[in-house]
Amino acid sequence: MIEFSNYDILRNLLFATQWTILLSLAAFIGGTTVALALTAMRLTRNPAMQRIVKIYVELFQGTPLLMQMFLCFFGLSMLGYEISAWSAAILSLTFFTSAFLVEIWRGCIDTLPKGQWEASRCLGLSFLQTLRHIILPQAIRVATAPTVGFSVQVIKGTALASVIGFVELTKVGTMLNNATFEPFKVFTLVALIYFLLCYPLSLYSKHLEKKFHVSR
Amino acid sequence: MLYFSDLLQYSDVFLSGLKTTVELTVLTTILGVVLGTVCATVRQYGNRASQRVVSVYVELIRNTPFIVQLFFIFFGLPAIGMMLSPWEASMIALTINLGAYSTEIIRAGLASISKGQIEAAKVLGLNFRQTLIRVIFTPAFEKIYPALTSQCIIVMLGSAVISQISVQDLTYAANLVQSRNFRAFESYLVTALLYLGLSILLRFAFNALGKRLFAYRTSN
């Protein structure tokens, strides 16, 4: 039997943390991209497009992330599409992230007075010009703090990838627990590492929010 | 091809899973909101030390994944002598989780009640209990009610994770069924739709409850 020293436990956990960070980044980038596309669809004021976005948000906010992962991983492979745990995790986390971000951004864009759209129209700006020069510069300022805040949810969401067998921080935690029979120590360390990843982001989000309120 | 008919014979498995999920949701919603209300009150009106304790609790829970909290409670606590059944561990984990989030939400509501209103209540001769319920809590809860109820629904969806410590909830039912008939896609799809129905139903229930709780607005 292999003995695990404290150093071994910590080393393995820190190694796995890299995968948690990588998965979070991939999911965040994927989620932001899809959310941008969905926001654009919503802004077109086309009822059919808006409906699609609404259903998308309802579907992915109304079902558990774990179920989305199972569907992506076990479901798709049963239907004949081979998919790795890594791809299934990224795919489902992208759906999850984008569904929440599109709602967050919707709130940010809606806080801008509607008169601005109308005024731009009167001044002869096109839809894209209005978006580029009037709406986005203001909306991005409002949206930064909640978006950074939501990235914490993404990092925490990656923990569920352990359930479909993707080896990241939580998975290595359970594996080490099975090998060392020291659940208290192992899961305390796992929680601590997640905390060290998430807390600075939470603080930064709060800081941004304060800064924004001062500048207003 | 999809074969949903293969799921029909397992409908009682799904139903009993649904029942467990609903029971746990109702119980933890009540306990979590009570815990959140107490913590928020301490956080807003308590002394420095107790404020600090509540902040540490809230930040610790909000910045770690629910599944790790669950594993810590279910696997970690027995190692220091606290034996818990999977059901008890899930209930505690869900309550603690919702408690932390609702503390933040309810505190925002309490912070929105201006000091002048409390002083006005005193001047008008309302006693402590009346002030607390009518002047502080009711308007505060009315303000944050939508945020609080969406958090309750998020926790309900998050409860899917408790199947990992073998609580026989809806997700556990889905896993069981797909391991029997190998219809993974159908089984998970139906379960996802059941969760969707449950979250829509919960939202309706919360809205109806909100109309009754804050009826004083329209009744006078």
Image (tube, coloured by chain):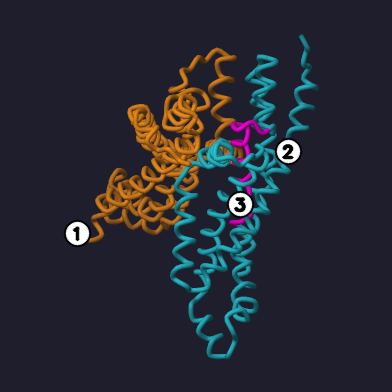
Chain colours: A cyan, B orange
Magenta residues, start to end = A146-166
> In the image, is residue B171 above or below residue B216?
above
Q: Is residue A98 magenta?
A: no
Please name the residue shown 59% across and 38% down the image. Answer: A77
The span from disc 1 to disc 3 (Cα, nearest Å) is 39 Å
For marks 1 and 3, give the one nearer the viewer. 3
> As drawn, which residue projects farthest toward the bottom?
A123
Amino acid carrying label 1: it is Ser
The span from disc 3 to disc 2 (Cα, nearest Å) is 21 Å
Label 2 environment density (alpha carbons within 10 Å; few <14, some 14–19, many ≥20): some
The span from disc 1 to disc 2 (Cα, nearest Å) is 56 Å
A104 or B20, which lies in front? B20
Q: Residue A205: horizontal and vertical position, in percent?
A: 63, 54
> Which quadrant of the figure contains the C terminus of chain A?
bottom right
Please name the residue shown 37% across and 42% down the image. Answer: B198
Mark linked to residue A97: none
Please state the chain letter of the residue tagged with numbered disc 2 in the rendered image.
A
> In the image, is residue A95 above or below residue A80?
below
Amino acid carrying label 2: it is Trp
| Residue denoted by label 2 | A19
In screen coordinates, is B144 left or right of A207? left
Label 3 environment density (alpha carbons within 10 Å; few <14, some 14–19, many ≥20): many
Please state the chain letter of the residue tagged with numbered disc 3 in the rendered image.
A
**Residue A179 shows in this picture:** yes
Secondary structure type for disc 3: helix
Secondary structure type for disc 1: helix
| Residue denoted by label 3 | A149
> Which quadrant of the figure contains the N terminus of chain A?
top right
Amino acid carrying label 3: it is Gly
**Prevailing secondary structure of the magenta residues:** helix
